[in-house]
């Protein structure tokens, strides 16, 4: 090792500074999201507005009569509320950053390994929580959520876990397409997934096979099983977690591969 | 590199990054073996005696996890072993190689077996007693196998010795018949091409598949059956692990093979994941192979999957773990000892917890945590600093680290005068880089010396941006070597000494200037205070303004602040003064001079030649991907042997143009302007022809003229 290399090694971050670097990255990523009202407002308002429209105004009687229907509605719109911000905010912001040359610039900087990735995923999950909480408050306020406190916590945890693969999907989209085109491409994946995964209506048996291709399917399964609802065609909790983990690894790997090569 | 199959090498500043990655892979394969053996007591339906204990909380999940790990871990190990074996062979020669292997492999095999075998027998016996409540039934006799010998988990050392013999014999046959090296060059080409295409995973899977198809008794879960019960070489192991070892050897030979493995990491890993999913599905349907099409397909998919994992994991390590890490190095050093010593520890713990009324979800992590604590502890206390470490790793670490001279923060380093006797802080050596058929850089050599400002000049498309990108680790050269602060620019430790101001980069428009600097400062060990950075860059007044609302010049000033906030030892400034007003440009120049005085080395690209003339210690001119000239500013001016002479005179321009030595002549109002090869004869003639001439000025060619002339010639 020569003198230059020794001096370079002397510039290594202490564990404390490394943690600080990750936290700083997360903090500013979050501030960026909050300072972008054009992105924050729709993802926080649309799911809760749709939930109130369908579960309270249109199907209010059915929801009041049947516990299963009430939970089915809440789970469906909750999945929508957590997956939307994860996918759309990350894909468009990352796409824009790539267009601005920021990802190339970040590669040249000595940021700790994967700090931007951690920041994006953490902020994506927190953003999902912010979008999910109004849903939860609205459902409790409207009396359309027949769950005890423990079940609410279980379902909320399932939602947060379910947001992670969508953060990874957002990263992949942002890594592959331009920022301006990202919302369009994201919709091409997101909307069919919402319907074909059986989120909003029970699927016919002939359609169950393809449902396994959509991450929304597993998030919904996880959320329903978290509150004790299970049907014969459901997959096991382990399989739902395994599938979501698999999607996360796949999407993240493609994103990292693309960004590591081109930025 | 270390331990079982490689010499001890210190991290190399230039090529070392490859070795760090492979060292990490080898350590990973060995530690994965510990985790794998810890799963065995939890396998559902495992017969007593196969492992030390049958746990009362079996786990299908651990069975599947163990299966996945077992698919590739030993092939991965033998692949890396082959790579390092060739490196060692060429470093030490045949005799030295065998002496080294005898010590590092032979001695641990013999001594390790003598110590471990009685302990293993005792633990197995304790496990059987515990499982059967003290009444162990008579076991059926083991089938007689030629050369039977309980090698235990040390079989891999014996297998390595067999492979060393095999490769030495093969080499002894090939080398005399291929003195010109044509055959070996052809093999190198095949290796690299198969990795690039990429068909290597398919081709390499065939030998192991054929060997497994021929096996009459094959339990799918075992993948390649381990040859731990006989001294006679076993066909599946020789085919599977022999292919891995031989390919590792060949990859070490073939130029560009490692790069090809690195590029293909993701497709190979995806292939491995898909193959593993199919293998698990098939294995669940029927655990024992039956002769027929399913067995054949299973064997072929297994072969491809093994190589998907081997090349995918190696490529991912080359991509992401190529830098030096003290932690990874420690773990890699420890892994050989840990693997040698782990079996009694893991098996003993399995016996201890085997009948606890607790789920495997608690017992398995418990076994792992306690095992690794004991094994790492024993490595640190008994091995690392003792003769055992010397034997296993070729190095005995002193208990106390040698004291290094403290390195002062860059801002307080005394200003070096030009070169301080050390080598360049950044270097491009024999670099060639192509984009498709376009040659961006062609055999380029540039170095940046400590404390100097190197101006890299050139017309658009000359290769300046490519050169900078190479130094920043944003792109990789097709050939040649890039160094930054004594290592690869891909290493994060090197980039911590780097500041960058790039062209055409926008920063986060939602963040304020202060926040952008705070974020960038968090990446460095000893950054400037944020207020100090703002003050130096002259943007204190902009601190709380959102970046998106700044003018173009203010954005450049902010980018400069971000570039200098980490007290860089090397600073890259790509067109830094574009868009700056006169005052801001003067402040930038002042800052650049201050940084130079502090010992910072700077690479500047600019189209403003007066900027380069004012700041540069040296200049390198690029054109059409080549360095066409380099030297100090006066040296560059001298390359263009011209003088500009100007005076007020009545002599006609047409007459002057006929004089010898005149390159160009023109008149603007009363003023006569002449460009001549030499000034003195021209001045003498002017005074002779017109004694009344006035306001005579003689000026040598500027950098701008030199640049124009040089690039015109190159074009």
Image: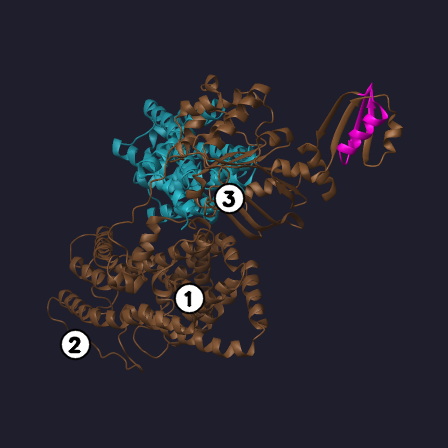
Q: Position of residue B593 (x, y in %)?
A: 51, 29
Dot 3: element: strand
Quarter assignment of residue A117: top left
What label sits on residue B426 in the rendered view? 3
Estimate how packed mark 1 is, as few (under 14), some (14 to 19) or many (20 or more) residues with alpha carbons within 10 Å.
many
Mark number displayed over residue B138? 2
Query: Residue at 61% of width from left, 29% of height from top?
Result: B611
Chain B's colour is brown
Disc number at residue B88?
1
Query: Which circle, 3 or 2, is nearer the viewer?
Result: 3
* Badge 2 element: loop
Q: CA distance from mark 3 to mark 1?
A: 30 Å
How packed mark 3 is, by other alpha carbons closer than 10 Å (few <14, some 14-19, many 20 or more), is: many
Magenta span: B666-693
Horizontal side of B357 relative to B12 (left or right) equals left
Q: Output the letter for the chain in cyan.
A: A
In the picture, measured across the screen, residue B275 lies left or right of residue B676, that is left
Reading the chain from its start, which is encountered first: label 3 or label 2? 2
Q: Position of residue B694 (x, y in %)?
A: 78, 19
Q: Quadrant of residue B631?
A: top right
Q: Nearer the viewer, residue A42 or B229?
A: B229
Q: Quadrant of the N terminus of chain B?
A: bottom left
Chain where mark 1 sits: B
Q: Is B653 placed above or below B416 here?
A: above
Element class at badge 1: helix
């Amino acid at each position: 090792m020569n003198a230059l290399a020794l001096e370079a090694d002397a510039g290594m971050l202490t564990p404390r500074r490394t943690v600080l670097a990750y936290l700083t990255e997360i903090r500013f990523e979050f501030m960026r999201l909050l300072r972008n009202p054009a992105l924050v407002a729709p993802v926080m308002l649309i799911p809760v507005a749709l939930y109130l429209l369908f579960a309270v105004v249109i199907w209010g009687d059915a929801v009041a009569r049947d516990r299963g229907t009430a939970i089915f509605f809440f789970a469906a719109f909750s999945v929508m509320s957590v997956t939307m911000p994860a996918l759309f905010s990350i894909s468009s912001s990352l796409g824009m950053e790539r267009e601005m040359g920021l990802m190339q610039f970040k590669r040249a900087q000595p940021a700790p390994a994967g700090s931007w990735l951690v920041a994006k995923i953490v902020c994506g999950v927190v953003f999902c929580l912010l979008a999910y909480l109004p849903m939860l408050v609205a459902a409790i306020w409207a009396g359309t959520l027949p769950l005890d406190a423990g079940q609410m916590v279980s379902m909320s945890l399932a939602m947060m876990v379910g947001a992670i693969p969508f953060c990874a999907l957002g990263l992949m989209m942002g890594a592959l397409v331009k920022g301006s085109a990202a919302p369009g491409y994201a919709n091409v994946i997101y909307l069919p997934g919402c319907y074909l995964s059986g989120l909003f209506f029970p699927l016919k048996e002939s359609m169950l096979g393809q449902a396994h291709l959509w991450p929304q399917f597993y998030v919904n399964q996880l959320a329903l099983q978290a509150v004790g609802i299970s049907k014969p065609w459901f997959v096991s909790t382990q399989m739902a977690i395994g599938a979501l983990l698999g999607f996360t690894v796949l999407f993240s790997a493609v994103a990292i591969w693309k960004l590591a090569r081109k930025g | 590199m270390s331990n079982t199959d490689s010499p001890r090498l210190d991290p190399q500043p230039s090529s070392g990054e490859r070795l760090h990655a492979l060292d990490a892979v080898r350590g990973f394969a060995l530690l994965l073996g510990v985790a794998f053996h810890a799963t065995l007591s939890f396998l559902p339906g495992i017969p007593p005696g196969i492992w030390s204990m049958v746990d009362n909380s079996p786990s299908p999940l651990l069975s599947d996890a163990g299966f996945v790990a077992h698919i590739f871990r030993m092939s991965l190990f033998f692949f890396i072993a082959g790579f390092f074996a060739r490196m060692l062979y060429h470093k030490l020669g045949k005799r030295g190689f065998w002496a080294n292997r005898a010590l590092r492999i032979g001695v641990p095999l013999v001594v390790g077996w003598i110590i471990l075998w009685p302990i293993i027998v005792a633990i197995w016996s304790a496990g059987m007693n515990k499982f059967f409540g003290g009444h162990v039934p008579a076991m059926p006799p083991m089938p007689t196998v030629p050369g039977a010998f309980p090698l235990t988990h040390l079989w891999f050392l014996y297998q390595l010795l067999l492979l060393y013999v095999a490769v030495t014999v093969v080499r002894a046959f090939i080398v005399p018949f291929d003195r010109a090296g044509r055959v070996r060059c052809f093999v190198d080409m095949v290796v690299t091409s198969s990795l690039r295409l990429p068909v290597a995973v398919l081709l390499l899977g065939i030998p192991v598949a054929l060997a497994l198809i021929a096996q009459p008794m094959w339990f799918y879960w075992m993948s390649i059956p381990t040859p731990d019960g006989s001294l006679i070489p076993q066909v599946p192991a020789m085919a599977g692990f022999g292919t891995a070892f031989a390919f590792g050897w060949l990859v070490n030979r073939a130029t560009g093979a490692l790069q090809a493995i690195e590029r293909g990491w993701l497709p190979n890993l995806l292939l491995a994941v898909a193959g593993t999913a199919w293998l698990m599905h098939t294995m669940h349907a029927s655990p024992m192979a039956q002769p027929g099409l399913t067995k054949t397909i299973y064997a072929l998919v297994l072969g491809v999957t093994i190589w998907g994992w081997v090349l995918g994991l190696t490529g991912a390590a080359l991509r992401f773990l190529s830098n030096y890490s003290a932690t990874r190095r420690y773990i890699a050093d420890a892994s050989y000892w840990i693997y040698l010593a782990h079996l009694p520890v893991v098996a003993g713990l399995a016996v201890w917890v085997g009948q606890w009324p607790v789920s495997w979800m608690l017992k398995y992590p418990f076994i792992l945590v306690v095992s690794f604590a004991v094994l790492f502890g024993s490595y640190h206390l008994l091995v690392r600093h003792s003769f055992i470490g010397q034997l296993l790793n070729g190095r005995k670490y002193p208990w106390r680290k040698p004291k290094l001279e403290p390195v002062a923060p860059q801002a307080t380093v005394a200003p070096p005068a030009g070169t301080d006797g050390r080598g360049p802080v950044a270097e491009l050596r024999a670099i060639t880089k192509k984009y498709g058929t376009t040659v961006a850089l062609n055999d380029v050599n540039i170095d940046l010396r400590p404390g100097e400002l190197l101006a890299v000049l050139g017309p658009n498309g000359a290769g300046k941006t490519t050169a900078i990108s190479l130094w920043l680790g944003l792109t990789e050269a097709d050939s040649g070597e890039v160094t930054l602060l004594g290592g690869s620019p891909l290493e994060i430790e090197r980039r911590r000494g780097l500041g960058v101001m790039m062209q055409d980069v926008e920063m986060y428009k939602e963040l304020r200037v202060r926040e952008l600097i705070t974020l960038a400062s968090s990446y460095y060990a000893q950054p400037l205070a944020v207020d100090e950075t703002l003050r130096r860059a002259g943007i204190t007044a902009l601190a709380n303004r959102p970046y998106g609302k700044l003018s173009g010049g203010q954005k450049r000033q902010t980018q400069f602040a971000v570039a200098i906030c980490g007290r860089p030892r090397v600073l890259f400034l790509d067109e830094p003064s574009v868009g700056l007003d006169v005052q801001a440009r003067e402040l930038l120049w002042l800052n650049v001079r201050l940084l130079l005085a502090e010992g910072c080395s700077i690479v500047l690209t600019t189209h403003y030649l007066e900027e380069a003339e004012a700041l540069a210690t040296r200049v390198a001119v690029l054109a059409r991907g080549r360095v066409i000239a380099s030297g100090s500013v006066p040296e560059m001016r001298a390359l263009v042997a011209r003088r500009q002479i100007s005076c007020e005179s009545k002599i006609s321009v047409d007459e002057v143009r006929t004089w010898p030595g005149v390159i160009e002549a023109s008149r603007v109002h009363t003023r006569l302007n002449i460009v001549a090869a030499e000034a003195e004869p021209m001045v003498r003639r002017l005074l002779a022809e017109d004694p009344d001439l006035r306001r005579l000025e003689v000026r040598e060619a500027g950098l701008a003229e030199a640049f124009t002339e040089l690039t015109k010639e190159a074009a």
